[in-house]
Image (cartoon, grey):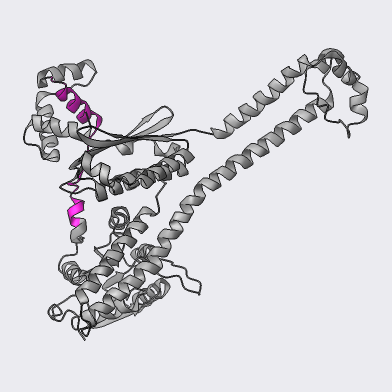
Amino acid sequence: MKYIAAILLAAVLLFTSASTEITIPQDTVSTNMNPNIATDNPGSPAFNFKFGFLDDEATGEYSLQDIRGRIFLFLILMIFLYLYTDFHMKKKMESYYTELRISDTIHEKGQFTLQSLHEWIERSPELTNKEKCLKAIEELQQTYREISTANIGIDTGQNFAVQLIETIEYFSNTDRKIVINSIELIDWDKISVYKKVALYRVLQELLVNMKKHSDCTIANISITKSWNRVNVRYSDNGSKKAIDQKTPKKGMQLMEKRLRSVGGRITFDTNKNAGFSANFFIPIYSF
Amino acid sequence: MLIFSSQSIHFNTMFQKILIADDHDTVNRALEEMLEISIPVINRSQYCDDALLKIKSAIADRDKFDLLITDLVFKPDTRKENLKNGWELIATVRKLQPDLRIIVYSIEDQLYPIRKLYREDKINAYVIKGRDSMQQLWRAIKKVDSSPDSIRNEVLEKASRQQGVVQLDDIDLTLLKLLGSGLTIKEIIEVLAKEGISISLSSINKKLNTLRVQFDAKTNTHLIIMAKEAGII
């Protein structure tokens, strides 16, 4: 889709440059009038690129250089477009790989060290204040776990919807129900990997905030697809007090930043009586 | 020294030979101390490749392992490894010896990777590392020993019943919306019929019943209020 659009764009660019040449005053055009000049010294066309159809009108035939120039320009444009999209793709995936690295490091080093410390304390009868130590370690472990979870690897293949549902499930319990719609029916294969990553992370951030700060008992997540957008709506019945006091501004800004990088937008909304809601969308095709 | 001396009572186990794969020496040793009274042969390995080698040679000697207790994440070593983590080890071992019981003992607590292990690799139990996890592991070993079916850690057991998540399809949503706009069930059937969905009175009542159970609502009014609170309608 992206490449077809790029080719179309290049073609349109060439065509418009051709049609604008017609408006050039007569005396500048007259230097190119003689076809012999153009064919005699092809090494120095001096970039009097003849995209225009003017030559054809004047001489009645296509000049070779004209076609060559056009193909050359077209190819350069294509290469630039390819490099541009490739670069952007890599840049967008880079943050994801950084996240994975963080997750791995914490898994490998941090949690291991804590776990061994934990076991060592449990095995040392001579220690006083054992409970306090263990409690502190547990808190640290919880923090590590949160960081690790926030950066967890995402299955962007076939199992994306399953992982999404199970992540939502992870944040729910009997006292806090989460209602979802048929997420797995959306055609996830058509959405690029980095957009899926962004969607997953933003939703995860919302759910983490819910778990930490909200006192809601029921929440709703609905993901729907319109022609070029994936719309996500989150709403809950948490009290206004809890939201005003605790919801961190930083987290909201992060979500906004992440969505902007993939061409999406997010709006937050707190109702007067109760409830917090967030709406965001991600475009399926964008340039 | 026994850590859980009260729990480490000898029990008659089917397990004769087990393998513990964990790159953490303290975990390894603690497990061995806990199990050595009941289980005659306990092997340890700190690398996935090493664990696989031990399992392979045990199969070749016709003296298979009965149980594998493994972690998921292993520290990378300076030497080149074929199997980098527990996931790869489990997948490979499953193919080699389908009847091997596998207990995963790891710090990972996200549902998706754990469920995947149950679904795809048919592991027998999963215990999350943490406080008192040794006792949980002990219980898991006993359970896996007595019944070959999969058992889950309590944390997972709670989540596995899907009490927290309610998934609604389009018909459920329309039903809630129509009910919330004040229509009676008879009128709802008419409206749905106009949209080309034919549904009987009994199946609507059945659906509403399921919804009430899912939402923990006592009456339809209660159900609508909850749906409204959640922002569904």
Magenta-colored span: B157-183
Between residues A95 and A65, which one lies in front from this camera angle? A95
Residue A103, by quadrant, is bottom left
**Looking at the image, is B200 positioned above or below residue B37?**
above
Q: Is residue A9 left or right of residue A212?
A: right
**Looking at the image, is A172 positioned above or below residue A122?**
above
Which quarter of the figure is the N terminus of chain B placed in? bottom left
Q: Is residue A180 left or right of residue A22?
A: left
**Looking at the image, is A278 positioned above or below residue B162?**
above
In the image, what residue occupies the spot 62% across and 27% down? A9
Q: Is residue A192 left or right of residue B34?
A: right
Between residues B131 and A193, which one lies in front from this camera angle? B131
x then y, percent, for residue B217: 9, 37
x then y, percent, for residue B116: 31, 54
Q: Is residue B176 magenta?
A: yes
In the image, what residue occupies the spot 28% across and 67% down? B105
Q: Is residue B75 magenta?
A: no
Residue A84, by quadrant, is top right
Q: Is residue A234 visible?
A: no
x then y, percent, for residue A27: 87, 15
